[in-house]
Image (cartoon, rainbow, N blue to C red):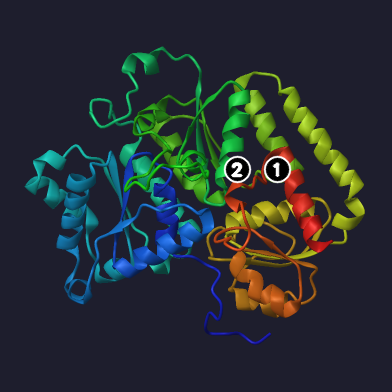
Amino acid sequence: MKHRHYEGNPQKNSPALGATLAYLGINGLLALLHGSQGCSSFIRLQLNRHFKESIPLNSTALLEDSVIFGGWEHLKKGIAVAADKYKPQIIGVMSSGLTETYGDDMASALTSLRLERPDLKELPVVLAGTPDYIGSMQDGYQRTVEALVATLAGHDFQNRESLNPVSATKIDSEEVPYLTLLPGCHLTPADVDELKEIVGDFGFRPITLPDLSVSLDGHAELEAAPVVQGGTLLEDFQLLPRSKACFSFGLSMEKAGEALKEAYHIPHYNFPSLSGLTATDTFILTLAKLSGKAIPEKQFRQRSRLLDTLADYHDQLGKLRVAIALESDLLYSLGSSLVEVGAELTVALAASQAGTDRLSLPVPMAVGDLETLEERADKTKLIIANSNGRQAAGQLKLPHLRAGLPVFDRAGYPQTCWIGYEGTQRFLYAALNAVS
């Protein structure tokens, strides 16, 4: 096949969008893009179309002169104005290709600002480097979660008046063991909600970082706010060292989990997938061993239903030829669960290189755009991709199951749960119904 030296129909989103997604799971956070206003507007548009929610995102609004001569002062001013005007509990900054190419030093700008404004010395500010050339959305999300952990884990924020009222006495007196959860960007708010419920059934109190199941779950708000409403509480970060263990989900979250393990000497377990019978068995058995509790009857019942589905539809699933184009964590999660039931992957296209050399599928993962998908998926029966894959599916006259981000031409995707026994059953039904 002829090699192309261009991207005809990109499937990847910018790393800064992934960073924004991670920041949207932190309660009371004001997200600030160090870049142009157009970049922040496009990120808001993509996320708004996907979640059907207003997206609180500010920018340092760089113009031509500041791009050429540096946006150092713009960043200082942006942080100061945001702190003074909106009174956030925390500010999360992400860089862009413009500022990283010039070489803006965000850390030194923050240090300089705090020397000029001692009143901002105690305001937590997280800095994440997310230039466009490092990869895709998953890469930016990963870097931002790592920056959140490195900046905030173990810190004492309870003396700050702006925090939600959680008393030290209440925290210290709780006997329920904590379990840290690091969900990757491939998990929907509904996935994260299910994850927390399963962990809670084993007697753990989950600390979820970031927690999109509270901030982007589709609840009604009276009015849009400039800071994130819901998500991981700032005071939860100080509880991370007290966790009995850390669970990270998706290979991209492994590094953040290892950082917590090394810093606080807590066990770390990485789960590349939570979809499929084998992956869910591994997760449930790990929880049972760690908690010392019996597996809840609900999980046995859901597993039994999944097994019945596999028996009922094995002839259809076993003949299914599927082409997938997604971020690597989601590609592996859905792809491996299909392979497990006998389906054949004909194409596996990742949005960026991250993780493709460590995730094993019957067909090698390649990095490609949606034009590559169109070129290679002609002998399949089903395409799984985000909404932008509809052009390839239309050209090839193939059914198209929406997954990933953005999904803007189908209702309710953020409330879709495809993890665990029950979620896997739903995913298999969705795949079967798409081709029926």
Image quarter of the N terminus: bottom right
Farthest front residue in view: 222
Describe the element under mark 2 as helix, strand or loop.
helix
CA gap between label 2 and label 1 equals 8 Å
Q: Which residue is mark 2?
A: 191
Q: Is residue 108 above or below residue 167?
A: below
Badge 1 element? helix
Q: Is residue 359 visible?
A: no
Position of 29 with respect to 378 (left or right) is: left
- The structure residue drawn at horizontal position 10% and vertical position 41%, both measured from the top left corner, is 118
Position of 339 with respect to 29 (left or right) is right
**Would you name the residue on which mark 1 appears?**
423
Q: Which callout, 2 or 1, points at the residue further toward the start of the chain?
A: 2
Q: Are marks 2 and 1 in contact (CB under 8 Å)?
A: yes
Q: Which amino acid is tagged 2?
A: Asp
Whether residue 71 can be seen here: yes
Where residue 113 sits in the image (x, y, percent)? 13, 50
Query: Residue 37 bears which disc, if any?
Result: none
